[in-house]
Amino acid sequence: MRDVRTHLMHGGRGDPLLVMAPEFGSGVWHPYLDRLAAHFRVLAPDHLGFGESERPEWLDDVDDLVLHYVDLLDALEVPQVAILGTSFGGWIAAEFAVAHPERVRHLILVGAAGLKIDGVPRYDLFLNPIEDILRHLFHDETRAAQLLPTEYGPDVVVHAYRESTTLARLAWNPYLYNPKLERRLARISAPTLVVWGEHDNFLPPAYGHAYTRAIPGARLHTIANCGHLVPFEQTEPFVDAAVDFLLRR
Amino acid sequence: MQFYYFHLMPWPDLPADFDRRYPSSWVMLPNRIYDPQRGQQLYNEYLDELERAEALGFDGLGVNEHHQNAYGTMPAPNLMAAALVRRTRTAKIAILGNGIALHDHPLRIAEEIAMLDVMSGGRIISGFVRGIGCEYLSLGVNPTYSRERFYEAHDLIVRAWTEPGPFAFEGKHYRVRYVNPWPRPLQQPHPPIWLPSQGSTETIRFAVQRRYPFVTVFTAYAHTKRLLEEYKAEAQRAGYVAPPEQIGFALPVYVAETDARAREEAKAHVMWLFHRGLKIPPHWLLPPGYVTESSLRKFLAAEMKPPSDLSFDALERAGYVLLGSASTVRDRLKEYWKDLGFGLFIGGGRIGDMPHDKASKSQELFARDVIPALRAECGSAPSPSGRGSR
């Protein structure tokens, strides 16, 4: 779209659900997507500069991604959509819902980045090597295996470097947040569910509370025995909560 | 050949548990380890050593910029140059280099260098660097913009020095509507610009186009040779023969009475330098976007072991350091000169946590027994170039 190649995975039938992927595991049709596809028409793009999507020179702000997703929805002729975003994808989802509230039917934010709370530090993705990061993001380290590469040959390293470069381009400083977002969250009009892992060591649960307080009518759902990457670590309870929210509201 | 005495100004007093407790001497090593009283003694000793280099006959003195680490405690190299300007008379003062991509206002660097150049009577050499990966973690500057910022800052600084002000510079990263620095530099068209580098193709091409001296730093000899040959080949492609005064070779050197004494006396300090001073996790050296994906691929393919992984013998064999009696050092440098054709030799004197007395002895032996012989045999090169493109 607009001369930028975007890789889009999709599946299922029903109301459209736009899934904003986290900064890990791009380009793969994960089990949680498959389960959601049992109830919805799941649209799972790779963000620009992640997975198999191109990284254009002009990409330097989360705002650029928000407009890109407006283009995507227009191209797919989807006037209104439910959006589910995890981690970095949750930040994009929140910004989208702030800027284009009329296009969002439901909003689910899962361990969403985008805010900063003084006194509640966030784990530094850029300071730590990839092997440590993925283990840190799971409450039970053994569950990280589903995302950890089986070997660290040059292709794997260069691919991870590429995605890390995109993330750094967008989120190095301010680190993974937009100072203006919190004040703007009141503009979100869609019913919103905030989902957080009880043992999130990357964005502690205080961030879940902050999102819930700031978004009108939002509800917080905490997933027990779970770290930051909720859709991967506790797929079933997560999907149940998401489907329940989307179908019953 | 021109001889520069180069100082890193390290913090030598690391805690006894450093090796097992800290992943690096950079970025996160707690600054309570720095003792300002001891720091006062060290800074003044280091400056004494640099001043003494002038008295001993070195052509120039070298300082550099690094932040938040024990390897080198000069976050503001222009301050060290300022301290040296009034206490020296004839030696060039080489700042190797200002991290021009690291700061919010490159114009400030243009101003400071101009001041130093005027104060010193035109003795400043203005090196420019991007700053190693660690600096981007320390200072919060986005490494994905490192190269863009470097080139834009370079352009702003050179134009500030050479273009009549006021003029507007409205770039992507730096925007100043009235560039009009006072003072203007003394050297014309501007102080020489040197590029100390670990050698990306892009830097080499840039250096060649502008005829900026290229200085290899802290690499194994084989890699140094590859880089300098690439520089010379690139110069050929650009239509000229790279003269010796455009080719710089930096190397830690230690001279003692005999080869055996040199190795014995320097060993612990060489190991400090490479195993502690340069103990840096690889992902801090290459933060996201700092190199291109193709550079990263080449780097992985080369499978180069970092010097912090090498034994003392391996470091010496690979040419990371040059240790020996004066005649050994002289002969080896002459061999290197024949092989590489460098006209600028930048010798690191006080290696790692080496004490003042050893560093002074080596400095004196080098100045007395190595420099004159090499000047006689390899020629006294004309003044360093780097005065801008033709």
Image (cartoon, coloured by chain):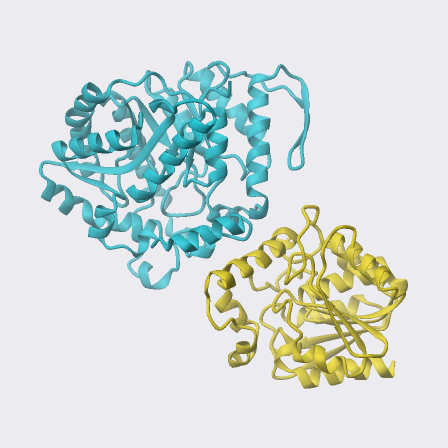
Q: Is residue B363 above or below residue A107?
A: above
Q: Examine the image and state in which quarter residue B166 appears.
A: top right
Q: Name the residue nearer the viewer: A174 or B163.
A: B163
The residue located at (14%, 47%) in the rendering is B264
Is residue B60 found left or right of A46 in the rendered image?
left
Image height of B39 relative to A72, above or below: above
**Residue at position x 26%, y 41% in the image:** B351
Q: Nearer the viewer, residue B71 or A3?
A: A3
Residue B233 on image: x %, y %: 40, 32
Q: Residue at the spot x=41%, y=41% of the render?
A: B198
* Near-viewer residue (B354 or A137): A137
Q: In x, y percent, where is residue B20?
A: 33, 64
| Residue B235 sits above or below residue B149 on the image | above
Q: Which chain is yellow?
A: A
The reply to whether residue B30 is in sight is no
Q: Position of residue B338 (x, y in %)?
A: 24, 29
In this picture, residue B268 sits left or right of residue A245:
left
- Does residue B313 appear left or right of residue B236 in this picture? left
Asked whether residue B219 is in view, the answer is: yes
A74 lies above or below B250: below
Which chain comes out cyan in the rendered image?
A: B
Q: Quadrant of the N terminus of chain B?
A: top left
Mark count: 0
Q: Which quarter of the figure has residue B15?
A: bottom left
Which of the two residues, B165 or A82, is positioned nearer the viewer here?
A82
Q: Position of residue B88 (x, y in %)?
A: 33, 19
Residue at x-position 14% and y-position 35%: B328
